[in-house]
Amino acid sequence: MTIKIEQALISPRYLAGPGDPAWVTTALHEGSGWSHGHDPLMPRVILTSPDQKTMLRLEPHLNEPWWHLSHRDGRTGSVWNASFGGGTPVELIAAVTDAFTDPDYHARKGADPYQPLRRARWDAAPNGQFRSPDGRVTGERFNFSGSRNWRITATLDEDDPVWHAWFSGGTPPAVVAAFMQALADPEPVRRSHEQTIGFPRRRITLRWQEWPAESVARALPERIERLASRRTSAPPPAPPAPPTARRRTR
């Protein structure tokens, strides 16, 4: 007899609630090789990329972002930051971390962050502002300290924000585009019974469906395996070119 588990399919996904943080944290650690600190007395998670250039911090705060992502590359001078409120669906955050841990990430430097929104028929104005068709998500590019930053807000009602996301001006377009792609994706996301308790259900469509328990349990391990396969299948970096021989002069 196949045991089945009922899960909720929720759309639009940007109002589905946060979900399971392990979709991001465990996937980064076990699938992408990020190391983590261990502080049992603090309710936080800190993960660091293998090259020590990027750090993800998950730390609950009442009126502050829960997720903080920071990148600093001393060799190239690349510095950027992103933050996400506690109500941000983990699928949107995972799209960001999946993007810059992808071995093909550098090939997408010219990505247009607005393209996924236009394809999904979102309003995208020339001044950098955009809005979802239902008006529940708004975003803008704005000048701050001499750079162009991104700010995105999801709301249930006009004065009832669910989450905020922010990207600094130095954030690579491919990273922002990955977030926008996940944000505008019409596919619903799954949530367990526990993850829907106490979450406002207005403005969303929720449909319960049964899946085999084994399939539900395998979702995260399969995600980790996909991320790990990207690392093992990535071509090794090209060896440095040999130094050019200098002609001796008398």
Image: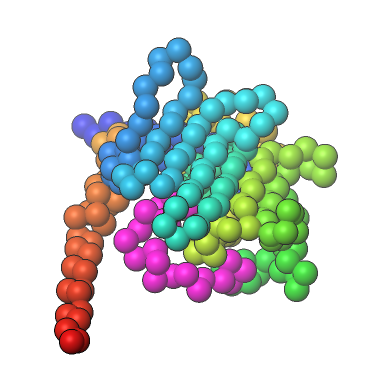
Q: Between 244 and 249, which is closer to the camera in this rendering?
A: 249
Residue for point 45% across, 34% down: 21
Foreground of the two, 185 or 92: 92
For the C terminus, which image quadrant? bottom left
Q: Residue at x 67, y 24 (%)?
A: 62
Q: Is residue 181 visible?
A: no
View extreme (front): residue: 250
Q: Is residue 114 left or right of residue 216?
A: right
Residue toward you, 45 or 208: 45
107 part of magenta stretch: yes
Q: Is residue 70 above or below residue 58?
A: below
Question: Residue 115 vs residue 103: left or right?
Answer: right
Q: Using the rendered view, name the quadrant where residue 7 is placed.
A: top left
Quadrant housing the N terminus: top left
**Residue at image point 68% right, 51% down:** 152
Where residue 200 sits in the image (x, y, percent)? 67, 33
Front residue (pair 213, 13): 13
Q: Is residue 186 magenta?
A: no
Please give the range of residues in magenta: 96-115
Asked whether the viewer can see residue 83, the reply is yes
Please name the colour scheme applied to the rendered image. rainbow
Name the spot of residue 240 as percent of width and height, x first. 21, 69
Depicted 139 relative to depicted 122: above or below: above
Answer above or below: position of 173 versus 151.
below
- Residue at 62% of width from left, 35% of height from top? 65
Rendered view: 106 above or below 85: below
Q: Horizontal and vertical percent for residue 197? A: 57, 26
Q: How many marks?
A: 0
Residue 124, percent from left and from top: 71, 69
- Residue furthest to the top: 41
